[in-house]
């Protein structure tokens, strides 16, 4: 009879330990899920920020491209004007006007 009581106490203790481990596992799981959700939200925020930055880069790239085209046109016009004989009377033939 004493052996049965001892065995029952050991089983009861094992059960309590198993319940404690299960509760701890549940708490760990909840904590991991919360952290996962937090990281997913952070990732979404960063993706939105990245999209905004990419849009800005595209916008500024277009502006730079337009500015480069305008500069090329202005340089071409300046070169054409510089090659006109009336514009560069004081320069020797073939040497340009020194404008550039």
Image (cartoon, helix red, strand yellow):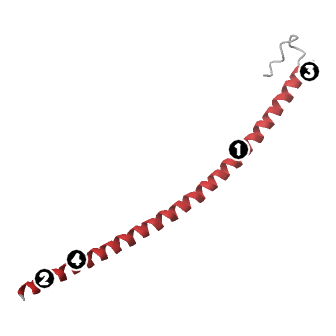
**SS label for mark 3:** loop
Q: What label does residue 7 carry, if any? A: 2
* Residue in front for this viewpoint, 11 or 81: 11
Labels 2 & 3 near each other (Cβ < 8 A): no
**SS label for mark 1:** helix
Whichever of labels 1 and 3 marks the residue nearer the N terminus, that label is: 1
Whichever of labels 4 and 3 marks the residue nearer the N terminus, that label is: 4
- The location of residue 77, given as percent across then percent down, is 86, 29
- The location of residue 15, given as percent across then percent down, is 22, 80
Q: Residue at x 13, y 82 (%)?
A: 7
Q: Residue at x 88, y 20 (%)?
A: 83
Foreground mark, 4 or 3, reads: 4
Rounded to the nearest angstrom, the CA distance separating label 1 from label 3 is 35 Å
Local packing at callout 3 (Cα closer than 10 Å; few below 14, some 14-19, many 20+) is few
Rounded to the nearest angstrom, the CA distance separating label 2 from label 3 is 113 Å
> Quick check: 23 above or below 79?
below
Foreground mark, 4 or 1, reads: 4
Write down the residue under mark 4.
17
Whichever of labels 4 and 2 marks the residue nearer the N terminus, that label is: 2
Specify the farthest residue to the bottom. 1
> Quick check: 4 above or below 98?
below
**SS label for mark 2:** helix
Whichever of labels 2 and 1 marks the residue nearer the N terminus, that label is: 2
Write down the residue under mark 3.
84
Write down the residue under mark 1.
61
Labels 2 & 1 near each other (Cβ < 8 A): no
> Quick check: 94 above or below 73?
above
- The location of residue 31, given as percent across then percent down, is 38, 70
Local packing at callout 4 (Cα closer than 10 Å; few below 14, some 14-19, many 20+) is few
Q: What label does residue 69 carry, if any? A: none
- The location of residue 28, given as percent across then percent down, is 35, 70
């Amino acid at each position: 009879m004493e052996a049965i009581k001892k065995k029952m106490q050991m089983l009861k203790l094992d059960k309590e330990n198993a319940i404690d481990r299960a509760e701890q596992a549940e708490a760990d799981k909840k904590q991991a899920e919360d952290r996962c959700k937090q990281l997913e939200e952070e990732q979404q925020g960063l993706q939105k920020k990245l999209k905004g930055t990419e849009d800005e880069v595209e916008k500024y790239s277009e502006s730079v491209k337009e500015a480069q085209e305008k500069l090329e046109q202005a340089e071409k016009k300046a070169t054409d004007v510089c090659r006109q004989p009336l514009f560069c009377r004081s320069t020797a033939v073939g040497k340009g006007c020194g404008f550039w």
